Image (tube, rainbow, N blue to C red):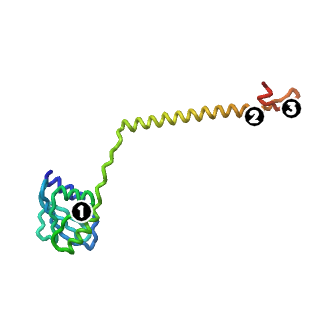
Amino acid sequence: MTFEEMFERAKTALMKAKVSDAATVAVQVNVTGDGSGIFYVKADSGVLAVEPYDYKDNDVIITADSAVLLEALEKGKANELPIEGCPIKGDELKEILASVPAKRATRTHKTTTTKTTSKSATKSAAAKTTTSKTAATKSTAATKKADVPKTTTSKRGRPSKKTAATEE
């Protein structure tokens, strides 16, 4: 991993931190191991700046291996990093680092084929249910027609009631 790649990951995580308007702290971060280099973090009046430069007028210094630094930043445990320098400014920095949210776990997405299959399966299941309901409705309607008395007129023009059972 190059310094630029490591710095971009660190900056992305740090820029999500919440900085109070009262916080004023300048931090030099010395990165060792893979992707080694130096960058600074400055919090002033509620604004956070993260740049890939050496910062001579710092309040505190963090020295960490790149893997440890990135893991702490991405898992929301950056306030556990070792801090050297002014204890008061160190406490301000820990408060800022504690507000860095943990990186969300990557979701695995279902493939389009699976979604298509499940949609078509749902449609066919719905069609079967609709067919069953329609058949049940027809048989119920047939039963109801048989039970309902039919009204007919007699030869004299008066209505007479016959049931399906008497017609048979």
Q: Residue at x 67, y 33 (%)?
A: 141
Q: Nearer the viewer, residue 46 or 166?
A: 166
| Position of 136 relative to 19 (above/below) | above
Name which of mark 1 and mark 3 comes first in the sequence.
1
Q: Which residue is drawn at 70% across and 32% down?
A: 143
Neighbor class of circle 1 (other Cα within 10 Å; few <14, some 14-19, many 20+) is many
Say what secondary structure mark 2 lies in: loop
- Where residue 22 sits, quadrant-wise, is bottom left
Q: Where is residue 165 in the image (x, y as percent from the top left)?
A: 78, 28
Q: Marks 1 and 3: CB-CB under 8 Å?
A: no
Give the numbered dot on residue 148.
2
Q: Which of 116 and 45 is in front in this view?
A: 116
Q: Nearer the viewer, residue 41 or 155?
A: 41
Inspect the image, locate mark 1, and give the three-letter code of the amino acid beneath it. Answer: Ala
Give the numbered dot on residue 158.
3
Q: Residue at x 19, y 62 (%)?
A: 50
| Position of 32 relative to 148 (above/below) | below
Say what secondary structure mark 1 lies in: helix
Cα distance in 3D space between marks 2 and 1: 80 Å
Name which of mark 3 and mark 2 comes first in the sequence.
2
Q: Position of residue 29 (x, y in %)?
A: 15, 63
Cα distance in 3D space between marks 1 and 3: 96 Å
Q: Looking at the image, is mark 3 or mark 2 nearer the viewer?
A: 2
Cα distance in 3D space between marks 3 and 2: 19 Å
Q: In which quarter of the image is the C terminus?
A: top right
Instruction: Spot the residue most to the right.
Output: 156
Residue tagged by mark 1?
A: 78
Name which of mark 2 and mark 1 comes first in the sequence.
1
Inspect the image, locate mark 3, and give the three-letter code of the amino acid beneath it. Answer: Arg
